[in-house]
Image: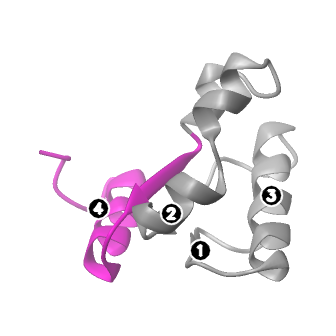
Amino acid sequence: LRARALVAFPGGYGTFDELFEALTLVQTGEIPRIPVVLVGSRFWNRAIDWDFMVAEGFIGAAERELCTTVETGAEAAATILRHYGLGPPRS
């Protein structure tokens, strides 16, 4: 609950458990919105079909935007800094 961000790299059940727990806490308002950054679009786009979840009504379109997918650690850091108003805007 003290985390200021969640950065997830490709992984197994433990990774998914932590990811969905954090998303659920943000979604339900139990914690303030934090940046949730997924590193490695090749993995995450195959592992989780967010668009399908929206189309089926399991999550709302706004909830789809709770995660940002990036390719590098530098992009992850920039995403977190932008969230807190500490970095340059996204180009």
Q: Give the range drawn in magenta.
A: 66-91
Q: Name the residue under label 3.
A: 20
The quadrant of the image that shows the C terminus is: top left
Q: In this view, does 83 lie above or below 50?
A: below
Q: Where is residue 87 shown, x and y percent of the image? A: 23, 61
Name, please, the residue furthest toward the front: 46
| Residue 58 in view here | yes
Amino acid at dot 3 = Phe
**Mark number, residue 91:** none
Amino acid at dot 2 = Val
Q: Mark 1 points at which residue?
A: 8
Q: In this view, does 55 lie above or below 33?
A: above
Indicate which label's residue lies in the foreground, 1 or 4: 1
| Mark 1 in CB contact with mark 2 (< 8 angstroms) | yes
Q: Name the residue under label 2.
A: 37
Residue neighbourhood size for the residue with mark 2, other residues' Cα within 10 Å, grouped as few (<14), some (14–19), many (≥20): many
* Render colour scheme: one colour
Q: Where is residue 20 shown, x and y percent of the image? A: 80, 58
Considering the numbered disc 3 on the image, is that residue within a helix, a strand or a loop?
helix
Name, please, the residue furthest toward the left: 91
